[in-house]
Image (tube, coloured by chain):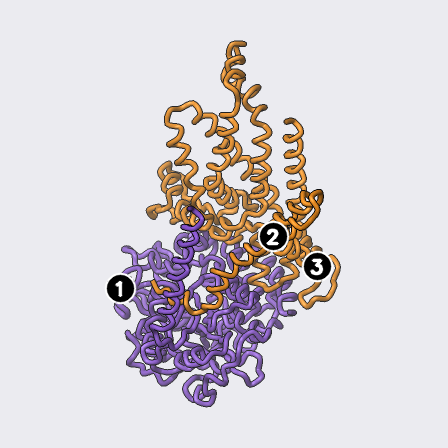
Amino acid sequence: MRSSSLIRAVVVALAAIFAAVACGTGGTQSAGSVKVIAVWTGQEQAAFMAVVKPFTDSTGIKISYESTRDEDAILTSRVAAGNPPDLAAAPSPQLLTQFAKQGKVVALNDAVDVNALQQSTAKTWVDLGEPLHDGKLYQIFSWAAVKGLIWYDPKNFSAKGYNVPNSWDSLQALQTTIKGAGTTPWCITVNSGSASGWPASDWLKEIVLSQSGPDVYDKWVAGTQKWTSPEIKQAWQTFGQILGPNDANVYGGSQYVLATDFGAVGTPMFASPPKCYMLNQASFITSFFTSANPALQAGTDFNFFPLPDLSSQFTGAHVVAGDSWSMFHETSQAKQLIKYLTTADAQAIWVKRGGKLAVNKQVNLNDYPDVLSKESAQIIVNTQIAKYDATDNMPADMRSAAWKGLLDFIQNQSKLDSILKSLDTVQASAYKS
Amino acid sequence: MDFSILLQDIPTLLVVIIGVPAVLVAYIVGGEYLIRRLPDENRPQVRPWLWVGPALVIVGGILLLPAIATVIQSVQDNHGNFVGLQNYATQLADFPSGGSWIAIRNNVLIWLIFYTLFVLAFGLALAVLFDRVGYETLVKTLIFMPMAISSVALGVIWKFMYWYQPAGASQTGTLNAFVTFFHHEPVAWLQDQWPNGIGILDNLAVVTAATWGIVGFSMVILSAALKGIPGELLEAARVDGAGELTIFRRVIFPLMMPTIVVVGTTLVIFALKIFGEVYVMTNGNYNTDVLALRMFNLLYLSHNNAAASAVAIILLIAVIPVLIFNLRQFRAVEARR
């Protein structure tokens, strides 16, 4: 009797499932969970898990974490399908601002005490969290990074008798000296999947801010400063001087710059003998240094100096960035997690892991794992002109066009005028929607 | 593993486990019950519709309706206002480097021609050559194996193959280790827009990777067609004094032609909708963009649904002639029987 044994099998299977369901729900006194999407994998994911562990331990709320390197696409399609995560952390506030405009994210004013936040955080970060300027907080920042830090290996510098440059001119002079000794001064690598080109945009942003000041920078971000304008063009040309004629200042030339992942930028610098002496990257790069070579020690094997001022008019200008959070489902668990992430306790765990700086001012400087992150934390505190990452605040179209333009520029600097012209075309349409 | 996530939404779980089969059974049993109530002569007309009905509903719901919606969206702006063919005009503006032109060029000139030819030529050559050796099954299995690899994994593997280090440094990429062994400068395969910034080299590098992944497919099908050729024909040709090359040209190739055309048109469709390999290996940078990737980027990076719809329709229009040809060919083969 085949059919009756089949039915029996189905009944047994269903009974087993019901039993499992019953046990599952009855067995644990669940405090619920929060679904989170972010870009962090590997070390960064481990750091996030360490940050939320005390939260889960004390509240019982579980974190179900999903990571993706193509967050724009994943989040957009999940929001469109009506299936967003409870919380998302994004390296580009522009994406989350887009969702705020569409009314897809919930304001955080209920979850976070905004007055307390203003006490504990620099004004820049709270302002950035209110992108619609309607008094509603849509984003909070869990950590920050200082951009435009020039990393070098002090042992290499002292071996050759090089001094840390304190002005743009002395940086240029050092560049010439290093080239004269038959080595390339710089390491630059810009490959990063669908975001390829962003490390080069860091150079450009830093130069624009330091060369032409915060007003031009703000207009540039807002889309009212043309790419073909003299200020922006000058910044590209200055970046071209760093690359050198025919990329002669950069290890491996343009092909290597384009073909190599951004995280591997330090490898030739730590080679023996060094293939390059300096690289420009945000403070997070140290975690890539030490994961590639755990023997490297902050301070003795790598150190940094801020990119020297390009103009005496705008001294101490720095570009900063950070990962921001938004809430898509207003659940009490999600609100508790958001609140927890703004606390000094949570951010202290993050900074102890290295590479990240707290936006919460109450985080003790002694919590920073090494002297370097302590110094960069002080830069954030002391910066006279702090501006958020420009390309990350431009519309996505503009941002990816700028990245692509920089890739073309690295490949062939003589194309600058046509690159800037096409960026103007994108600018004319990208800001409309 | 933590399976607790499965238990978070028990009603959904029950609907999926019990509801879906229950509805299907009810549909079939109920439908048959109603058909039995019909007069005898009407039953053969109604019964097929009962069985193809679910398939029609699914095809209509998830293929036809979205396609129509895409057409409508492609003539609107992002706020739903009718703008005529403006989205298409934007995509087709500034020939030869603006709009979608680079993507169209790569799809039509590079992928459609080189990918299809490479895969057919290699597939045919491998099928014919392996037919003559004793270890055929083993090598065919090996050649077929990359088919099991997803396009993303394939892209990652080939990125390692193409890895670039400057001249003088030790080359970790297989291909550059090879070319530097012969004292040639290393080549940045995926970034080098040889010749003259036109970008043939980097595109062909991606095409080669994709070819490696699919060649087993054409080899297996062509090999089956080859085995279907009666031995007497080949024997008769040999008796008449034909050499092996002549036999291939005059007997084997014409007899395999219908199969080659079917595999070829399938490959053309693959070539037009290529996405994964490009996404992983170059992300459309350095003049390697293709239409499917452009559509993806417009949709998810630019949030420009209207432009993405226009690109989707351009892609659809490009595929339609191939589909018609494919159907005609299919009918011709049927008629010959």
Mark on residue A296? Answer: 1
Please tell me whether mark 1 or mark 3 is closer to you in this view: 3
Say what amino acid the circle numbered 2 marks: Pro
Tag 3 subunit: B
Where residue B43 sits, quadrant-wise, is top right
Q: Chain of mark 2?
A: B
Q: Position of residue A361 (x, y in %)?
A: 38, 84
Callout 3, which amino acid?
Answer: Ile
The one nearer the camera, A1 or A55, is: A1
- Is any part of residue A151 visible from this angle? no
> SS at mark 1?
loop
Query: What numbered label is drawn on residue A429?
Result: none
Circle on res. B72: 3
Q: Earlier in the sequence, mark 3 or mark 2?
A: 2
Q: Determine the colour of chain B.
A: orange
Q: Residue B241's x, y, as percent?
A: 52, 10
In the rendered image, which quarter contains the C terminus of chain A? bottom right
Judging by colour alone, the chain drawn in purple in this rendered image is A
